[in-house]
Amino acid sequence: MTNPSLLILAGDGIGPEVMTEVRKVIAWLGDKRDLTFDVTEDLVGGAAYDVHGTPLADETLEKAQAADAVLLGAVGGPKYDTLDFSVKPERGLLKLRKEMDLFANLRPAQCFDALADFSSLKRDVVAGLDVMIVRELTSGIYFGEPRGITTEGNERVGINTQRYTESEIDRVARSAFELARRRDNKVCSMEKANVMESGILWREVVQEVHDKDYPDVELSHMYADAGAMQLVRAPKQFDVIVTDNLFGDLLSDAAAMLTGSLGMLPSASLGAPMENGRPKALYEPVHGSAPDIAGEGKANPCACILSLAMALRYSFDEGDEATRIETAVEKVLADGVRTADLMQSGDGTPATTSEMGDAVIAALEASL
């Protein structure tokens, strides 16, 4: 049998730096766990624009469509701020998501015990937090038509359309219910059915899918604004939250800050199964390109390493190895190894990006 394929798109800013540490983990898996991937690399975002004049070359998209999983670093930076909207680095990432039809975005918000004091909330509110937000990613107001800026009378009008079909809601709901069955078996669906027709349809379809195929999963409904309040008030009441593209964008960022650092948060974007049974999939850290620290060895590679762990769990059915990596990261934090984003005044000298990666490898070695 051939090895599973992994396409690495390091991208811009701190993307190449954190991806270097991920490659160490990939090499370790091959050397010590007999888990080998056929790895190829290509360009995305500003790096692709510099070479091809587009943030995502057609050839790169073809590689992504054929790969068992794509691992992306980050895109964007001030160098590209003046580009036309159509070729900005972020358009490359959005095109990947759209063309691969990655409709379910999984954003875990997990608070490692060693970092509970870094949250803006009290320790007892966030310690042990483990929430998964499932955000619909390829429809809704970010893609709906009509859209644009027009003129009515003597003033400009900005238009965006919130649009969902039953099938789009159905498939992301099923992703959330399937995921809940592997966790604490609870789903909370969030929308604005009180003021939006798309929210009414969302609630109805999620309920129908539940009643027909997932009656064993506990389902609740909540308005998205109330959900945002509850995430801050008592986040541990949630297990899996499923919501639309716009609300998922907002709620997942709010949940991210409960954990203390964006540098610790991975994500997965999953689509329909391919012929080999694996889902179309793209994994990436949440933190973005952080151009202010790019090239300085200050970036935290843990989110990208944890994104690889998500790939092991959801694309390659290697849950035990995913847990091994997650446990190694947790041990490194408990041992006090921290990059600058995880330190407070007077904590000492922060670890470099490379030192953090090496510490994770050492923890993996110790796990054998």
Image (spheres, helix red, strand yellow):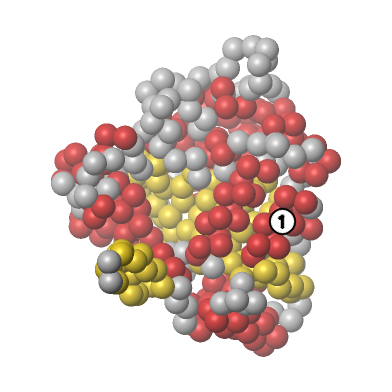
Which residue: 28% across, 71% down? 153
Q: In this view, does 29 lie to the left or right of 79?
A: right
The x and y percentages for residue 36 are: 44, 45
The x and y percentages for residue 189 are: 66, 70
Quarter of the image where one finds residue 133: bottom right
Which residue: 44% across, 21% down? 297
Count the marks.
1
Q: Quick one: which residue is furthest to the front in this view? A: 154
The x and y percentages for residue 365 are: 61, 29
Q: Is residue 82 left or right of residue 26?
A: left
Q: Quick one: which residue is furthest to the left in this view? A: 52
Can residue 213 be seen by looking at this rendering?
no
Vertical position of residue 86 compared to residue 306: above or below: below
Circle 1 sits on which residue?
229
Q: What residue type is labelled 1?
A: Met
Which residue: 45% across, 73% down? 162
Q: In this view, does 33 lie to the left or right of 51?
A: right
Vertical position of residue 135 compared to residue 320: above or below: below
Q: Quadrant of the N terminus?
A: bottom left
Can residue 163 be seen by looking at this rendering?
yes
Which residue: 72% across, 50% down? 232
Q: How crowded is mark 1: few (under 14 residues within 10 Å), some or many (20 or more)?
A: few
* Nearer to the camera, 28 or 338: 338
Q: What element carries label 1?
A: helix
